[in-house]
Amino acid sequence: MTQQLTVTPADAAAYFAASLAFHTDVSDVAAALASGEDPGFSVIDSRSTQSWDQGHIPGALHLPTSRIPRLAAELLDPARPLVVHCWGPACNGAARAAYALASLGYQVKEMLGGMEYWIREGLPYLAADGPDQRPADPLTAPVAAGACGC
């Protein structure tokens, strides 16, 4: 069965505008963090401690989703926007964490791709045994060029 295109351009524009308001991606977060200036947001890693120890984004705050109700007010500035991530695109942990934070009154976006794509794009991360970085996966990141062009 072929799916008919039944969405109006106006509905599509509204949907994608909303998507951009609620999502960011690994490349944009990495560029903001690498700029040397305050990126204007804090990165929140919502994964478990075991996952955090496997590798996390330098400068990220570890706040597992289950601890958000108890620790958010103690650890987070309600005036500072947050970018939340979990493992990757097959995981909805970042959406659950973003929902928990938004329900408490925080400004929040979800980082699409999560830790999986952070690593697959060849970005540096910290593991329990120190800093690490893998080569960029040519299926997910431009290897020769500095930007993907999107």
Image: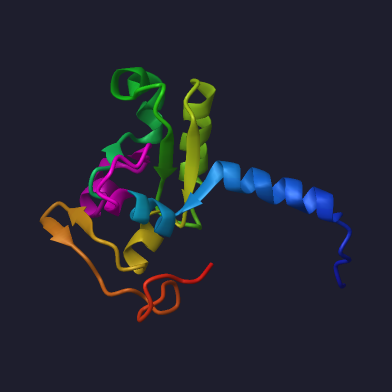
> Compared to 116, does 23 lie above or below?
above
Q: State yes or no: residue 139 in magenta.
A: no
> Compared to 117, does 49 lie above or below?
above
> Compared to 126, does 1 lie above or below?
below
Residue 69 place in picture, x, y as percent: 41, 21
Colour convention: rainbow
Residue 35 place in picture, x, y as percent: 29, 52
Q: State yes or no: residue 39 in magenta.
A: yes
Image side of residue 144 versus residue 55, left or right: right
- What count of labels does the image hold? 0
Residue sitting farthest toward the left: 129
Q: Residue at x 74, y 46 (%)?
A: 14
Image side of residue 134 versus residue 150, left or right: left
Q: Determine which quarter of the picture holds residue 64.
A: top left
Q: What stretch is highlighted in magenta?
A: 33-56
Residue 22 place in picture, x, y as percent: 57, 42
Q: Which residue is drawn at 52% across and 27% down?
A: 102
Q: Which residue is drawn at 14% across and 51% down?
A: 128
Q: Which residue is drawn at 31% across and 42% down?
A: 48
> Compared to 4, does 34 lie above or below?
above
Q: Nearer the viewer, residue 145 or 47?
A: 145
Q: Quadrant of the C terminus?
A: bottom right
Residue 90 place in picture, x, y as percent: 50, 57
Q: In which quarter of the image is the N terminus?
A: bottom right
Q: Determine which quarter of the picture holds residue 136.
A: bottom left
